[in-house]
Image (cartoon, rainbow, N blue to C red):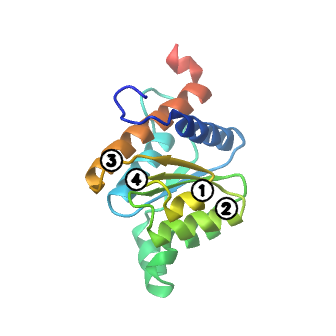
Amino acid sequence: MLPGVGLTDSGSIEQAACLLVKTLKESGQVFSCGNGGSMCDAMHFAEELSGRYRLDRRALAASSISDVAHISCVGNDYGYEYIFSRYLEGHAKAGDCLLAISTSGTSQNVIKAARYAKENGVNVIALCGKEGSPLERVSDVTICTPAGSYADRVQELHIKVIHILIEQVERELFPENYL
């Protein structure tokens, strides 16, 4: 059990952190996406990597798929289910990594993004609230935070997981900051 987190599967968190570190060490980019509160979490994840988390260090290549103009354009012209996959089509390359966040694990636009990513050599980390979800089936690593049927509880755990992932990435890439 991870202290203060309420998760028993720390192995998937470690696997996800390793994927993120590998991506960044090999000059890849990290993308993140989600809807509603999960989009806010995706944005928070990306800004902590590209900005800073605890201590000063170089910026890391991370971005959330949250540009309002892009979402509005693609949602109108292609359909809301393509807002994330279309962005990846224009920006992602093999060896990059996607953090796909969905409290239910059933958001079609997040699933389509994960599917596109997998088909194009982009590693997929799913952060969801229900085991056995459709999102889990198209991911390389799944971190599941079952917290009942309320999205707020799932999202509270998601932000803890996100902070753990960021700290693990920093500890690996910037060990001098954690002496």
> Earlier along the polypeptide chain: callout 1 or callout 4?
4
Q: Is residue 87 left or right of residue 51?
A: right
Mark 1: amino acid: Ser
Residue linked to disc 4: 129
| Residues at marks 2 and 1 touching, judged by CB atoms closer than 8 Å | yes
Q: Residue at x 63, y 70 (%)?
A: 89
> Earlier along the polypeptide chain: callout 2 or callout 1?
2
Residue linked to disc 1: 139
Q: Residue at x 26, y 52 (%)?
A: 152
Q: How far apart are the two marked residues, 1 and 4, measured between alpha carbons?
A: 14 Å
Q: Quick one: quadrant of the N terminus? A: top left
Quarter holding residue 118: bottom right
> Earlier along the polypeptide chain: callout 4 or callout 3?
4
Mark 4: amino acid: Gly
Residue linked to disc 2: 118
Task: Give the structural element (helix, strand or loop) at label 1.
Answer: loop
